[in-house]
Image (tube, grey):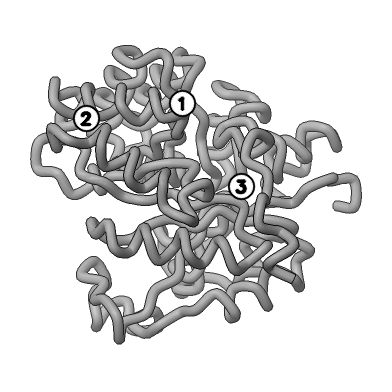
Amino acid sequence: MGEVALRLDAHHHVWDLDVRDQPWIDREAMAPIARSFDFEQFAIAAAACFVDGTIVVQTVADTAETEELLQLATTTPLVRGVIGWTDMTAPGIAEELDRLGELPAGTGLVGIRSLAQYEPDPRWLARADVIEGLRAVARHGLTFDLLVLPHQMPAACAAARAVPEARFVLDHLGKPSEATQQQWEIAISEMASCPNVYVKISGLVTEHDWSGWDPQRVQPYVDFALQRFGPDRLMFGSDWPVCTLAASYSRIVDVTAELLSTLTATERAAVFGATAVRAYDLAERPKEQQDDRQ
């Protein structure tokens, strides 16, 4: 895939269990990732796949983690941006976003994500207080990542329509599965009608049998998303290290390329880089501290 000018991984994580627990990790079922993962481990895997830049994504509802990820971005040239967390329902969300942006490393913040997937109310994203929070995110020039399940996608669509000035990115294609495919197809088609919504081809391998997943099982979801959104609104994300439950980093990159084999070189370049640059406004966020990071 030498035709790609920029290969960007728009979704990966790091965590240190000595610093902070990851309560979403099932220590028995997810034993291979129930340990710490640092950026050096990721960088080795990414370099082997000629990845030029990454976006690191929050994992827990903790502003301290966001600040740590921002600090990581100031010392690691590979990181082009951070998707952090803040309380979307807090009355002082605008002031909190101001505070994060004014940190020495604050220019690295390109987006916000809430853990909406775990909200018991399937309409949480459409609540009035969350909509106000989304407007604050938009005013700060940040993108909002949607971590939702298919039954929550109608509310995500409603939020995107209520805040048309915002940019939204649907993580992991909305986590489709064979059991939810019909519901997902209806919801993803509705979301595609919102021009301010982008989608990540990420996290699909861990939605299926980890021990023997077949790329052909996820091909229909990718094809459907391509038909509805087009390559200019789709982007690649590895979801490392979660993806390692089912496949290595290099396997994820190779399989994604296989899933997109019918696209032109320009279209593949969009999915592997250009779409993420636009969705997260990365072109407007130069690496100001580049000289200090060498």
* SS class, disc 1: strand
10 Å neighbourhood of mark 3: few (<14), some, or many (≥20)?
A: many
Question: With respect to residue 23, does 221 lie above or below?
Answer: above
Q: Is residue 48 visible?
A: yes
Q: Nearer the viewer, mark 3 or mark 1?
A: 1
**Going by the picture, which residue comes out furthest to the left?**
120
Q: Which residue is mark 3?
A: 236
Q: How far apart are the alpha carbons under marks 3 and 1?
A: 17 Å
Q: Nearer the viewer, mark 2 or mark 1?
A: 1
55 displayed left or right of 293: left
Residue occupying the point 46% across, 64% down: 13
* SS class, disc 2: helix
Q: Which residue is mark 1?
A: 167
Residue occupying the point 39% across, 35% down: 144
Image x and y of residue 1, in percent: 85, 52
Image x and y of residue 21, in percent: 24, 76
Q: Which residue is mark 2?
A: 125
For the residue pair 206 and 128, the one nearer the viewer reads as 128
* SS class, disc 3: strand
Quadrant assignment for the C terminus: bottom right
Three-letter code, disc 3: Phe
